[in-house]
Amino acid sequence: MKLKWLGHASWKIKAAGKTIYIDPYQGDYDEKADIILVTHSHFDHCDVNKIKLVRGDETLVVAPEDCVSKIGPPVKTLKPGEETTVDEVVIEAVESYNYKRFRSPGNPYHPKGLGVGYLIHAEGKTIYHAGDTDFIPEMKGFRGIDVALLPSGGTYTMDNEEAAEAALAIEPKIAVPMHIWDTDPREFRRRVESVSDIRVVILRPGDTLDV
């Protein structure tokens, strides 16, 4: 399995003979997708032009309900706890939301029910893409995660401190910071690796990780 960070929250994953894009927005897109996963409807995660670029006639697009009108059918909608299977790849939606970061009083940037994270099961491994989220209680129930892709840039998502707390709760084999804005991911690595056996991998846009 090969993961390529395209920048921001955008990823390309090659697994079980499938090409999977998550939140296509930043980076280069030189290959059609078998599966496209969209975490929520904000423009920097649900980029309609990038989705059109990599979408083929047989591409499965998976997204929350409020993305459907932007993307255009057919779209497979998943709510947290639901899953879908494409040959040997299983896609499971999980919770992803803010409860402590607000656009205005009582109005979170990512309210519960707006978006999802994804667990991608393939080749005997599990990849977790958290979406735009705070460190939420549901993360404490995850087990058997091989790679956790965690936003750590703050403002709209977890910052380095909270992302480290999330990593320590999830206990993946590998944790990778993303959606970092202008923050220093080395702070995330220090907080995680100083107190655990979790390996933190810091990527630059375009870098790949084999797992």
Image: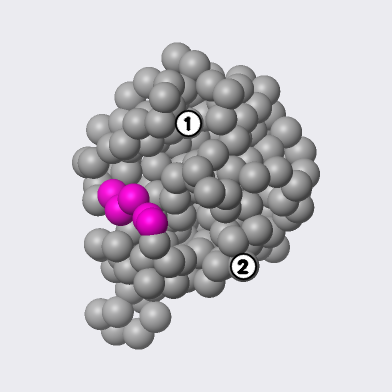
**Disc 2 to disc 1, how far (Cα)?**
26 Å
**Which residue has dot 2 on it?**
49
User: Which residue is drawn at the image coordinates 39% and 42% (left, top)?
Assistant: 118
Mark 1 Cα within 10 Å, few/some/many (few <14, many 20+)?
A: many
Q: Measuring 55% from the left and 67% from the top, which residue is drawn there?
A: 48
Question: Closer to the camera, 11 or 143?
Answer: 11
- Residue type of the residue flagged with mark 2: Asn
Task: Residue at 49% x, 16% y: name it.
Answer: 123
Q: Give the main secondary structure of the magenta stretch.
A: loop
x and y percentages locating residue 9 in the rendered image: 57, 53
Residue 87, quarter of picture: top left
207 falls in the magenta region: no
The residue carrying mark 1 is: 127
Magenta residues? 74-78
At x 37%, y 65%, the residue is 68
- The N terminus sits in image quarter: top right
Q: Secondary structure at mark 1?
A: strand
Q: Point out the tag, 2 or 1, that comes first from the N-terminus.
A: 2
